[in-house]
Image (cartoon, helix red, strand yellow):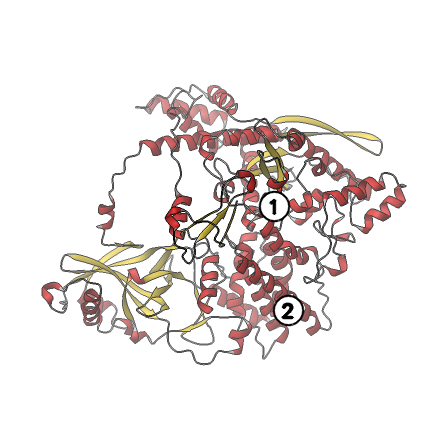
Amino acid sequence: MRINSVTIRLKKSCSKPELDDIKTEYHPHSKRPAVVQHFLEYRREAESEPILPPDPKPWRPFRSRLDFEFAKVALEAALSASQVDAMIKLFHRCSEGDRFTLKNNADFCDCWEKASHHLSPFEKHTISVPYKKVDQTFEVHGRPLWDWALDLIQEPSLAPHFPWTANRFWEIQSALPPNAKPFCFILYADKTKLLSFGTAKGYPVIARCANLPVQIRNSDGVGGGCVVGWLPVIHEDPAESGKAGFINFKRVVWHESFYELLKTIVELSRIGFWCFLFPLILILSADYEEQCIMSLIRGFGGKCPCPICLVPAEQLSDLTTKYPLRTSVNMQYLYEKTERMTREAGEILLKKYGLQQISNVFWRVKNSNPYRALSFDRLHAYHGGLWGDHLWPEIQKQIESLRRAAMKKLDTQTSELPRWRGLNHFNEIMKVSFSNGTKLEDISKLVLFSAHNILDLASDQEGYLLLQCLRSYLELDMYTALEVHTELTIKAGREEMNRFSGLIEVYPKLLDDSEKNWCFPKMHTHQHLFDDIKAKGVTQNYNTKPNEKMHGPLKDSYDLRTNRKDVTAQILRADHWCYVSSFIHSRLNELDKSLLIMEDSPDEIGSDPAFDGHVMLGAKQKTWTFEALGDAQQQDTMFIRFRQRLADFLSDFLPANQTPLPDGKCIHFHKLDTITEYWNLKVNYESAVDWHQANDLLHCDPSFHNHPWYDCILLRTVDQEIFGQLIYLFTCRVGDVDYPLALIQPLDAPIGNRLRKDKDLRFTRVRAKPRSQSEFISVRSIIQGALLARDFDNYGDFLMMNVVDTDMFLRMKKLQQ
């Protein structure tokens, strides 16, 4: 299915075309005509879900719901056998109501074993691979991949869902028989340490279903990621490690092991399942090192180190030239050709293409070109790669060259940047080492706004160019992160990539003695980024972040649920029980939803004085008289004539909003009249990216964990949208009605001519009016929150931090246009 804006046929309810109409185009095999809907109608249809009758006893095979809920908590807490026995005894002593029948840990384990057969369990296989003419055997644990797929296909709660799909999905559907459907796998594999301070390692393989919407597919619940395999970790013999033969041996073991996971779908990918489902691998999600193993290329040391195309190693930094793509057909042809050549001649041929002389396991699965399935990995390629390993160290080196005062200034200014929900706050960054991709991502969003007055054009031309590179990188990262793409955003993203390439090309020319080499794979791989988006959808479809998150529970199982002997079987048993638990728990939730009776009516919610349309005040504080408030704030010019100005505002505001004044007279407050203070504000708004409801939790708090926190906002005035900073949130009673209001400092003072730095670093600058010109607003006029950083060199000026989230990024692009 494709969605675009070209009108072919209108639904009856969409009789007259309008701006933002949505066209849904179905694949010809579906025999469904394309339809066009008005935007609001499309949203209503997309958000509605059919209600399925729930299972009345979803906790079975547990004997009661209480048994299951106890077992779920005990499993998640990784209680030992003795702890489970002790807790069961305690429950029997105090349980009332629902029947609790578990007897001891043996009964507890027996129930989980019975429940484990609800879904496909793990199986153990043994493979044998020769090394130096001696067969080496390894154990591979895995769920039969097709059995796991059938678990999802037969799950009623997943049946109503289908996603918008990208070009690759469409191409695969075209290659299948007219009455067939593709079942598309997303596979991820990465070796990980089971303890941060130990040597034990695990090699999980995680599967997701590409046919499901991303919010389900990337979740932790039903339809989300699932561990489907555990590959062998080969011991590194110091005498063999690093040798070409040993490296090839490890890769053969990897592909032979992976075949055990794919075995159940290899033949089905050619002939289909009984209802004509054709399994295939749509996406392979992995870091560059794993991608080299999956594609069987020679990696960074090879002549063609990209797993997707045949770019020469010395051209990795050139993002403007396109090179031939790898395909299963041409790579398999080269491999089979070398089978008929001498070993030396075959090695010479394969080296030319950076290919290993090993048969690729993914060639066996039809419609599963591994080189097209390999996908751009935003986490490792950008946050932990291009930024974390290259741009950020260059910026640190440049600041270190300016001596200790510059380093301290960067740390201080970074710590003074405003806090924001979901964004890490740092007190120092210069001398702290970070390996966490999320923290590196957040540092990249902050450094531009804390370093622009340190690496300036007048004193540090090289550092200033680095900040321009950083700005371009941040723009690219935002295009990469978009949850919905259009032809316009893809076009803008490609243009930004060319700009970034040009800036990087200039940088080494400014440093005659620079040893920095920009020819590395993660500099090149984002050349394929927008092709990936067009082929396989937005990057959250194949980001490794939700898969790496699943390493945590596996490490916990190793630490808390194993005896450190034969750990694989113990870890996977716990993982399978947790997987089954999530299915049972989701069905309990569905049962509860079907029985739920709403206690609060919309009228009752709307009567809350702190609630007003799309906004709601929170963190209620004390009630003040106007006299007490004036005494408490007498040093702040923002509160001068607070009572009189508020009365004047409401006397104008209420009639302008068709609300009559009490007794038809202008409002007058007495000094003993009261208002109620609040410290936060929740704002619901429509995302500019995907049109779903989003929300901001905004702070207006004089001491949030001993730090003042006053958020900025985007608000709608009579004739335009402006930024402002929250100063005071409160409700005020007029007659019998409480009105939620805010005192703000408007950020719409004239700026004058745009600075050279603002043009080069693409800053959006706003300026605060004097504090004495604070204004009252209705909180209903607030559109959403906004993150603005103080310009440390220009008091009263703020810089819009529009690279923190995709919504504000797109919203500011539209405002600038």
Q: In this view of the protein, which residue sits in the foreground, 815 or 806?
A: 815
Describe the element under mark 2 as helix, strand or loop. helix
Q: The disc labelled 1 sits on which kind of residue?
A: Arg
Describe the element under mark 1 as helix, strand or loop. helix
Question: How many circles with numbers are drawn on the protein?
Answer: 2
- State the separation of the CA atoms marked 2 and 1: 32 Å
Q: In this view of the protein, which residue sits in the foreground, 340 or 291?
A: 340
Residue ID at (46%, 22%): 108
Q: Locate residue 30 relative to residue 363 in the image: left or right.
A: left
| Camera-nearest label, 2 or 1 | 1
Residue at label 2?
503
Residue 168, numbered label: 1
Upstream in sequence: badge 2 or badge 1 = 1
Q: Locate residue 396 relative to residue 224 in the image: left or right.
A: right
Residue ID at (35%, 59%): 699
Q: Is residue 563 visible?
A: no
Task: Where is residue 594? Give x, y as percent.
Answer: 34, 32
Disc 2 crowd rating (10 Å Cα; few below 14, some 14-19, many 20+) is some
Q: In this view of the protein, which residue sits in the foreground, 411 or 360?
A: 360
Q: The disc labelled 2 sits on which kind of residue?
A: Leu
Q: Is residue 451 visible?
A: yes
Classify residue 685 by image quadrant.
Answer: bottom left
Please tell me whether residue 690 is drawn above or below residue 147 in the rendered image.
below
Q: Locate residue 164 relative to residue 502 in the image: left or right.
A: left
